[in-house]
C-alpha cells in the first residue's frame, strides 16, 4: 500500500511537471509597447460589421429564453452581414464572409429559415459569403466542443483557412460540455473568442436565459470580454420555437454596450408577421401593454414584474396613457 501511494505521488508530480512545460512561455513571443510606440501608433476609428452593435474584430452575445426567436434573429443578422445590407435598425456597411455554426436545429428546419430570409432580403451578390455548418452535416462525427483545446485548433484553422470574417456560434450549450454555473469553466471558451479576435475575426455567441427570462443562464463571466450583449424577451407567452419563422414578437434590450450610445442604445420591439418585420419603440409598446393590463385589473406591481421595470416606470406609462386619452382617470 505504501509503495502504491509513493507511485501515485510520483505520477501526480510528473503530470504537474508536464502541465508546467505545456504552459511555459517564450519571452521572444512577447513584446510590450513603449511610450513612443504608443504615441506613434495611429488611432483607428471604430469600424462596424453590423452597425450599431457589432464592431469589426468585436465579440457579442445574444441570449433569450427558448422559443423567442434568437436563432431566426441571429440568422437574419448573419445574412445581412454577408450581403452588406440592412435588417431592422441595423446596417452592414460592407459585405463580409460569414460562417454560421449551428449545433441544435434539424438541418431541414434551419434550411427552411435561411430560404425564408433569402426571399426577404434577396440573393447574395457573393454566394460564398454566407456558409452554414450544421451538426447533422458532419454525422457520424460531432462538431468540436468550444471548451476543448483540440476544438480550438479545429475552429481557428477552419475559420482562418476559409477566410471567414465573422462567425456565429449557435449555441453555447450544444457546442460545449461546460457546467455553465462555474465561471472557471468558461475560461477555455473565453480564450477561444479572444484568440479569434486577435486573428482579426468577429465573433457572436448565442446562449439561453435561465429561470429568470431577463438573466443570462449560468455564470456571466464571459460577458467580461464582449462589446455588446443583447437580450431578446418575448412579448408573447405562447410562441413555439417551430413557429418562429412564421411569426415572432419580442423586445431587443442591450444589456452591455461598449460601442452604443444615445438613441442607438434604446430598447425596441420587433414583430415578424406575414413575412414582414416591423419596428416599434419599446415605450409605445409598453404603454399599450399597460393599458390592456389596467383594463384587465392587473396591478402595477404585476405589470412591472412582467415588463422587467420599476413600479415608478409603470406609473410614468400610466400617466402618459392618460395624456394620450387611452385611459380614464
Image (cartoon, rainbow, N blue to C red):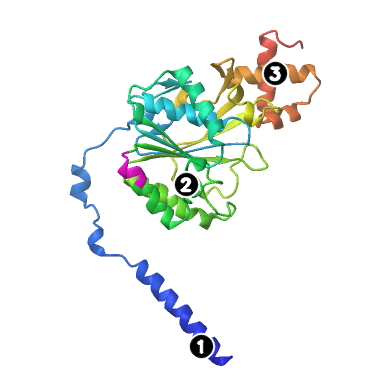
SS at circle 1: helix
- Considering only vertical position in the picture, is 11 above or below 218? below
Residue closest to the far front? 140
Report the residue at 41% width, 52% height from top: 152
SS at circle 2: helix
The foreground one among 13 and 218 is: 13
Q: Quadrant of residue 149?
A: bottom left
Q: Residue 5 location in percent, x, y?
A: 55, 87
Residue range corresponding to the magenta coloring: 158-163
Q: Residue 214 location in percent, x, y?
A: 62, 37
Q: Residue 314 location in percent, x, y?
A: 68, 24
Give the mark toward the camera: 3 or 1.
1
Report the residue at 42% width, 56% height from top: 150
Marker disc for residue 6: 1
Give the mark toward the camera: 3 or 2.
2
Give the mark toward the camera: 2 or 1.
1
Q: Which residue is mark 2?
A: 224
Residue closest to the far top? 325
Q: Quadrant of residue 240?
A: top right
Q: Is residue 314 left or right of residue 53?
A: right
Q: Residues within 10 Å of mark 1 (few under 14, many from 20)?
A: few
- Considering only vertical position in the picture, is 309 above or below 216? above
User: Which quarter of the figure is the C terminus placed in?
Assistant: top right
Marker disc for residue 318: 3
Amino acid at each position: 500500500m505504501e509503495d502504491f501511494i509513493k507511485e501515485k505521488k510520483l505520477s501526480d508530480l510528473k503530470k504537474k511537471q508536464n502541465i508546467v512545460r505545456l504552459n511555459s512561455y517564450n519571452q521572444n513571443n512577447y513584446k510590450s509597447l513603449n511610450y513612443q510606440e504608443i504615441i506613434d501608433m495611429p488611432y483607428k476609428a471604430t469600424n462596424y460589421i453590423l452597425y450599431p452593435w457589432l464592431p469589426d474584430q468585436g465579440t457579442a452575445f445574444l441570449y433569450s429564453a427558448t422559443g423567442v426567436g434568437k436563432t431566426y434573429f441571429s440568422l437574419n443578422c448573419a445574412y445581412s452581414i454577408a450581403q452588406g445590407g440592412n435588417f431592422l435598425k441595423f446596417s452592414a456597411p460592407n459585405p463580409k464572409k460569414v460562417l454560421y455554426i449551428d449545433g441544435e436545429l434539424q438541418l431541414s428546419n434551419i434550411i427552411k429559415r435561411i430560404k425564408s430570409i433569402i426571399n426577404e432580403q434577396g440573393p447574395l451578390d457573393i454566394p460564398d459569403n454566407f456558409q452554414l455548418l450544421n451538426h447533422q452535416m458532419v454525422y457520424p462525427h460531432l462538431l468540436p466542443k468550444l471548451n476543448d483545446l483540440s476544438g480550438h485548433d479545429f475552429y481557428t484553422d477552419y475559420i482562418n483557412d476559409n477566410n471567414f470574417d465573422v462567425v456565429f456560434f449557435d449555441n453555447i450549450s450544444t457546442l460545449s460540455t461546460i457546467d455553465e454555473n462555474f465561471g472557471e469553466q468558461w475560461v477555455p471558451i473565453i480564450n477561444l473568442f479572444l484568440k479569434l479576435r486577435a486573428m482579426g475575426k468577429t465573433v457572436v455567441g448565442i446562449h439561453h436565459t435561465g429561470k429568470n427570462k431577463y438573466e443570462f443562464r449560468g455564470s456571466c463571466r464571459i460577458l467580461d470580454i464582449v462589446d455588446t450583449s443583447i437580450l431578446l424577451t418575448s412579448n408573447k407567452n405562447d410562441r413555439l420555437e417551430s413557429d418562429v419563422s412564421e411569426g415572432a414578437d419580442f423586445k431587443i434590450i442591450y444589456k452591455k454596450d461598449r460601442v452604443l450610445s444615445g438613441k442607438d442604445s434604446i430598447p425596441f420591439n420587433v414583430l415578424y408577421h406575414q413575412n414582414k418585420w416591423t419596428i416599434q419603440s419599446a415605450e409605445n409598446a409598453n404603454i399599450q401593454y399597460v393599458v390592456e393590463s389596467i383594463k384587465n385589473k392587473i396591478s402595477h406591481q404585476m405589470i412591472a414584474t412582467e415588463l422587467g421595470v420599476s413600479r415608478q416606470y409603470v406609473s410614468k406609462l400610466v400617466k402618459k396613457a392618460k395624456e394620450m386619452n387611452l385611459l380614464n382617470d
